[in-house]
Amino acid sequence: MANNPSLAEYISQSQRGLYQSVFGPGFMKKAGAGIGTPFTVDTATGIFNTTYGRKVWQALNNQTRFFNAVPRVVWGNTAGWRVRTDRGSGRSRPVTETGNIPTVDISDIQTVSSLPRIISTTFGASVKSVFTAQLEGGVGDVLALENENAQLDHIKEINEELLALSAARASGGTDARADFGSTNAIAKHFKIGDEVNRYDLNATAHDITAGITVGGAGGTAHSGGQVTLDATGLSDAWAAGDIMYIYSRAGFSSLDDMVAEDGAAVGGGVANVRVFDLTQAGRTAGGWNAAASVSHNAGVGRDLSLNLIDTAIQKIRENGGEPKLILMGHDQYFKLERLLNSQQRYMGQEEYQVGVGSERTFPGTRTGLVLATYMGIPILPDADVPKSVSSTSTVLGSNIYVLDTDYIEMAIAQPTQYVENRDYFAANALVVRGLLYTMGEMRCKNLWVQAKIADLNA
């Protein structure tokens, strides 16, 4: 990584503030233009609120199980890879004693583009709050406290992005906003900077001239179940039944982006989700880049059955893979347990092993998690697993993913970095600001050997 700044350069440039910073103008701006809300003392919501003791307890789910389970690798000297998608027509066949040999043909080699993405988390505190927070009744070292919290939030954000939903059915909207219900259960999967596209129910066609960027003038992605868009450029306003799907991620590509197929039914509509190779208008139906096995029910909820899981496992094995992990939400976990108990087939207990190629970790080395299994495949429940949307725009149960993790990895270009900024002139305020950022991307090098089960009841 010859282009990476040295530690000395990071320290010097991070003090410069606005446009001179290596992080660009979007990370550390002057007051009134993006500095955010640091901890203060003189406001009702400040850091010096009444506290009993110094420990701050969290009422948040900070579990990041899927992120912990995905193998991590160094990015390496690559911006993508090649995929062989065809053996060559007629290159192998029987030959009689004096017959002609097969016609020479070559493999069909496809290219995949995968570039690193940046995830950042910020926090700040006024110099007055830093001092007073250590007095009697305060919370102690406010910077250390928020640094710890920011680390939890940073990894949680990564986990949520890795499990973001790739497509959803709108319940209504306007030119610049798409509605996805009254809460952010669905809308939260579309992040600021993501580019999305639409399947227009009225026109029964895709608006695919260019991606539409998420995040309006206020810099918000979602609020109250609405996704804000910078500009639409669409033929008409968003309406109930329109499908929003990912055209390009600003952050990490999600598992749902990868385990998708062209023209998959989403809430009764159609989605052509893209991933990695952004030079393509979409995935070709039945093609190599849409080869994952996706079981859906056209947006109509259905109960989980062992048949659905068995079929997903079968499809992966028919495509030359071997399932290593079953990922699901807690709702489907309990349904599966009841299914197995009623048939007196009990989940085993074993530790998760991660494999890359022919190598395997020791049991539990990577995550230390003890998991239930089905047919010898570890089952990992994660609260961030996305849920399907019905044909009436209601939220269904969580999806199930059956994965061959030999071909899924978290490639890290730059491990999580922490930068602290005390340049009061650049901030135009007496505040201390902190920044955590990670550069990387989740990669799936074989879409054939992954499977998804959608449209399940909660």
Image: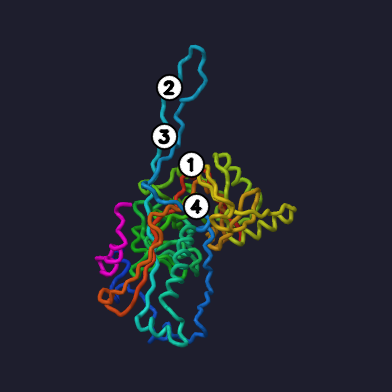
Judged by depth in the image, the label closer to the viewer, 1 or 4, is 4
Disc 2 on helix, strand or loop? loop
Quick one: label 1 or label 4, which is nearer the N terminus? 4
Locate residue 243, reporting x and y percent: 46, 57
Cα separation between marks 1 and 3: 16 Å
Residue drawn where x is 53% and y is 65% of the image: 63
* Above or below 56: residue 380: above
| The residue positioned farthest toward the top in the image shown | 98
Please say whether residue 5 is one of the residues in the magenta stretch.
Answer: yes
Q: Is residue 228 left or right of residue 56?
A: left
Residue found 41% across the figure and 54% down from its top: 412
Amino acid at dot 4:
Pro
Residue underneath mark 4: 71
Q: What whole-number distance in Å separates the C-alpha atoms at marks 2 and 3?
A: 15 Å
How far apart are the two marked residues, 4 and 2, measured between alpha carbons? 42 Å
Q: What residue type is disc 2 on?
A: Thr
Question: Would residue 53 be counted in the magenta stretch?
Answer: no
Q: What is the span of residues highlighted in magenta in the rendered image?
A: 1-22
Compared across the picture, whether 197 is left or right of 95 comes to: left
3D distance between C-alphas at marks 3 and 4:
29 Å
| Tag 2 residue | 103
Circle 1 SS class = loop
Q: Which mark is residue 108?
A: 3
Q: Amino acid at mark 3?
A: Asp
| Residue position marked by numbered label 1 in the rendering | 286
